[in-house]
Amino acid sequence: MAEKPSIDPRNLNAFNKALAEYKHYNQRELGPLIENRANRMRWELYRIFRDIAPDKAALSSELDARGGNIKRRIVKGRRLTLEQEKRKRLGSVKYLSIGFLLREWRATKTGQNIRKDQRNRQNRRIGEVIDRTARGIRRPYVEITNLLEGAAKQNAQRGLVNRALANQTADMKRYIVRKQKQAQARTIAKMNAFTKGLTL
C-alpha cells in the first residue's frame, strides 16, 4: 500500500492561493511578507505538536502500571535504570515541538538571508530554518524542518502539518475578508458623499 503523503496538495494549494490574495491586501514586499507568514506557521506547528504531548500524570501512571516491562534506552554504552528511563520519558513529553522552536530565528521587517539551527541539550541539530527573503532575492522562500524522526511519524499518523496549513489559510482568509469589508465601507462612504453633493 502506498504511503499517504505528509502534506495534502489540496491544503498546500489552498494556502498558496490565500497567500497570493493576502499579498494583494498587504503593503509589505513579498520577501518580508513570506517571512512573516513562515514565522506564524512556525508557531502554529510548535503549538500543534506541543498539544499532542501526553499528560505527564497519565504517562507516569501508565509507566508505573507497566512495571519493569519498559524498553530502556542505552546511553554511553549503559542501559538506563527503570527510574532513569521514566525520568527521561516524563522530561521529554513535549520534545517533538522543540524542533520547531528555532530560538535564534527572528522575523525582520526587511527579510533576511540566513540559516539557523535548533539544537537540543546535547547540541544535536533537531530543527532548522532556511530564510531566503532578503531584498533582491527573486523567489523568496522560507524552509522550516523538524529533524526529529518522531515528528515525521506523528505527522504521518495525524496530519499535523495539514492542520497547521488549514489554520494559517483560515487566518489569512479572515484578514482578506476584513480588508474587503474595509474597502467596501470606504467605497460606500465615497458614494454617499458624492450623492449627497448632487442633492445640494
Image (cartoon, grey):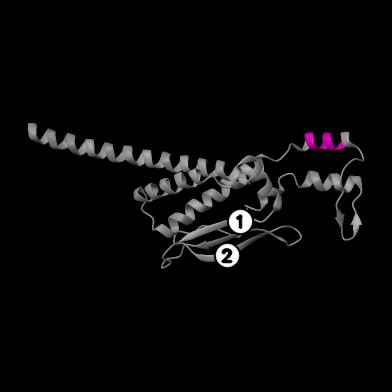
Q: Amino acid at mark 1?
A: Thr
Q: Quadrant of residue 78?
A: bottom right
Work out how far the residue at label 2 is from the one at label 1, CA to CA, in angstroms: 11 Å
> Residue beneath label 1, please?
145
Question: Could you tell me which quadrant the C terminus lies in?
Answer: top left
Left or right for 110, reference 145? left
The residue drawn where x is 48% and y is 59% is 141
Q: From the viewer's perspective, is the residue at label 2 or at label 1 nearer?
A: 1
Q: Is residue 191 left or right of residue 63?
A: left
Question: Predominant secondary structure in magenta?
Answer: helix
Find the residue positioned furthest to the top: 199
Q: Residue at x 53, y 52 (%)?
A: 39
In the image, residue 5 above or below residue 54: below
Q: Earlier in the sequence, mark 2 or mark 1?
A: 2
At which x and y percent is residue 94?
Answer: 71, 45
Mark 2: secondary structure: strand
Image x and y of residue 163, in percent? 56, 41
Q: Residue at x 13, y 34 (%)?
A: 195
Q: Residues within 10 Å of mark 2 (few under 14, many from 20)?
A: some
Q: Residue at x 76, y 60 (%)?
A: 122
- Residue closest to the far bottom: 136
x, y percent for residue 90: 79, 43
Quadrant in the picture for the N terminus: top right
Check disc 1: other Cα within 10 Å, few if <14, some if 14-19, many if 20+. Answer: some
Helix, strand or loop at label 1? It is: strand
Q: In the visual, does 29 lie left or right of 56?
A: left
Q: How many marks?
A: 2
Nearer-the-camera pick, 189 or 32? 32
Question: Residue beneath label 2, please?
Answer: 115
Q: Which residues are magenta?
A: 58-64
- The amino acid sitting under disc 2 is Arg
Q: Are marks 2 and 1 in contact (CB under 8 Å)?
A: no
